[in-house]
Image: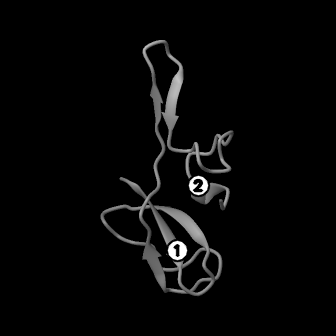
Amino acid sequence: MPIFEYKCGACSHEFEYLVMGGKDPESCPKCGDKNVSKQMSRCGFVSKGAGGEISSSSASGSSCTGCSATSCAGCGS
């Protein structure tokens, strides 16, 4: 059962939703509006060199370099 990211069309609240049986959320958990849309998920990676040093990271250009959250939707960045 995958977790997808959604955005409310009424209040712009971004949230994650555990999809069970392919059923999308019925409404926004913040405002209750039914106009929610699935978002393109963001993912991160770290590439290490031969000596174990970090050679590239997907977060290198963002302000979340020290973030330990599993999703950017969790902190709102």
Q: Residue at x 47, y 55 (%)?
A: 42
Q: Residue furthest top?
A: 51
Q: Residue at x 51, y 38 (%)?
A: 57
Which residue position is annotated with label 2? 72
Q: How is the image coloured?
A: one colour
Q: Is residue 2 left or right of residue 42?
A: left
Relative to 72, say whether 8 is above or below: below
The amino acid beneath tag 2 is: Cys
The amino acid beneath tag 1 is: Lys
User: Label 2 neighbourhood size at 10 Å, few (<14), some (14-19), many (20+)?
Assistant: some
Tell me the CA gap for discs 1 and 2. Answer: 13 Å
Which residue position is annotated with label 1? 7
User: Label 1 neighbourhood size at 10 Å, few (<14), some (14-19), many (20+)?
Assistant: some
User: Residue 60's quadrant in the figure?
Assistant: top right
Residue 68 position in % (x across, y down):
64, 40
Q: Residue at x 49, y 34 (%)?
A: 56
Q: Residue furthest left?
A: 21
Viewer-nearest residue: 8 or 30: 8
